[in-house]
Image (cartoon, rainbow, N blue to C red):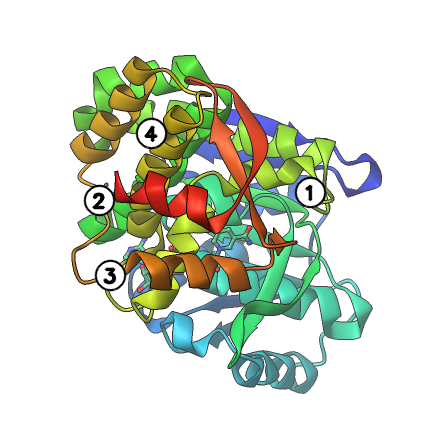
Amino acid sequence: MQTLNVNLGERSYPIHIGAGNLARIGEFLEQAGLRGKIAVVTNPTVAQFYLDPVGNALKLAGFDVTPVLIPDGEEFKTVKSLQAIYDRLIAERFERKSCVLALGGGVVGDMAGFAAATYLRGVPYVQVPTTLLAQVDSSVGGKTGVNHADGKNLIGAFYQPKLVLIDVSVLRTLPRRELIAGLAEVIKYGVIEDANLFTLLEQKIASLTQLNEDLLIETIATSCAIKARVVEADEREDDYRAVLNFGHTIGHALEAVTGYTQFLHGEAIGVGMAKAAALSARQGFCDAESLQRIEQLIERAGLPSKIPGNVSLLGLIQAMEVDKKAAGGKIKFVMCEGIGKTRFHWLAPSEMLNGLGA
Ligand SMILES: NC(=O)c1ccc[n+]([C@@H]2O[C@H](COP(=O)([O-])OP(=O)(O)OC[C@H]3O[C@@H](n4cnc5c(N)ncnc54)[C@H](O)[C@@H]3O)[C@@H](O)[C@H]2O)c1
Ligand SMILES: [Zn+2]
């Protein structure tokens, strides 16, 4: 087992990463000073595997457990689902010291986190992420929220959990496509911050996708440590936290123009990272060998790296311009300078069109 700490003064919290951690969940929550009423927010897909074990372990540790089920899917990450969570908390008379636990992927985590941030102006919450994406990305850093009909994550708050509990064993039930999509974020950490992580992935990507638990613990811990350091440096994304958007400007645009149906988020980020690396090489920031290594690792992980033929490049660029990072006609990009190092750079649409076509 590994434990890391996210150091944010009085909002600091631990991340525990291990195999079989769910069975010990009561212990970890007690250590974090939590007790009493707890709402376990989850969805039916995750509940069928993990609600009973988690609920029973919490009851054994003396918690008063209220399961709260929301339907499975990004389309339910809405104010309406949030309302259903508030209704349950109010009906069960949850108080300031009562606690919310998110058991699921990023959808459940973002929504339960926002419910916790806003119910009674904030109650403690715990992240128990069950997708690889949630384990390495969304459960750490305190971004919470829901979607609006006009855009993703438009309603939200920065609100840190009291604890993140990661059990790599739960990845065994995760659909393979979701697992691979989560790997995109792990590769991202290697490219932006950690050449050793990148090399480890190059050597062991096959064992990782076969769910070797020691390797999962090591790579998830390294990923969480990188995310924690970035969040510590710039909790509210005033500037530096935007390095985490490597591959995301193009990736988000690709998700948007394909109506959020063709690609999982991580798959779009696979394409986005390959193209961001190609743009970086074109601008003279990234050497040819690093570009080739990045493209190869993305492909070997089983992720797409090319913009599909049915997607218009102009449409893609228009989608980037409406993205919140566009200003003055130029688009802010995270460029890589080889592996493990990045810089920000502003690009005009014309420069991008040439680069993306390549
Ligand atoms: N807060 C942040 O910093 C942050 C960062 C990245 C992404 N996000 C958000 O995260 C969301 C995407 O998260 P996601 O990729 O985890 O998707 P998700 O939460 O939709 O989970 C993917 C699917 O896997 C299922 N699932 C989850 N765990 C499982 C398990 N162990 N076994 C079997 N099935 C399981 C889910 O029910 C769902 O069907 C998006 O809404 C995105 O905006 C937030
Ligand atoms: Zn992402």
The span from disc 1 to disc 3 (Cα, nearest Å) is: 48 Å
Q: In the drawing, does residue 232 fall left or right of residue 48?
A: right
Q: N-terminal of the two: label 1 or label 4?
A: 1
The span from disc 1 to disc 4 (Cα, nearest Å) is: 24 Å
* Residue type beneath disc 2: Lys
User: Against 28, is 286 above or below?
Assistant: above
Disc 1 packing (10 Å; few <14; some 14–19; many ≥20): some
* Residue type beneath disc 3: Val
Q: Secondary structure at mark 4?
A: helix
Query: Label 1 belongs to which residue?
Result: 32
Q: Secondary structure at mark 3?
A: loop
* In the foreground, 16 or 144: 144
Query: Label 4 belongs to which residue?
Result: 216
The span from disc 3 to disc 4 (Cα, nearest Å) is: 34 Å
* In the foreground, 127 or 179: 179
Disc 3 packing (10 Å; few <14; some 14–19; many ≥20): few
> Residue 135 at x, y = what percent?
44, 43
* In the foreground, 337 or 222: 337
Say which mark, if any, is on residue 311.
3
Disc 4 packing (10 Å; few <14; some 14–19; many ≥20): many
Which dot, 2 or 1, sits closer to the camera?
A: 2
Which dot, 1 or 3, sits closer to the camera?
A: 3
**Occupied quadrant, residue 253:** bottom left
Q: N-terminal of the two: label 1 or label 3?
A: 1
Task: State if disc 4 and disc 2 touch (CB < 8 Å).
Answer: no
The span from disc 2 to disc 1 (Cα, nearest Å) is: 45 Å
Query: Label 2 belongs to which residue?
Result: 306
Report the residue at 49% width, 43% height from top.
137
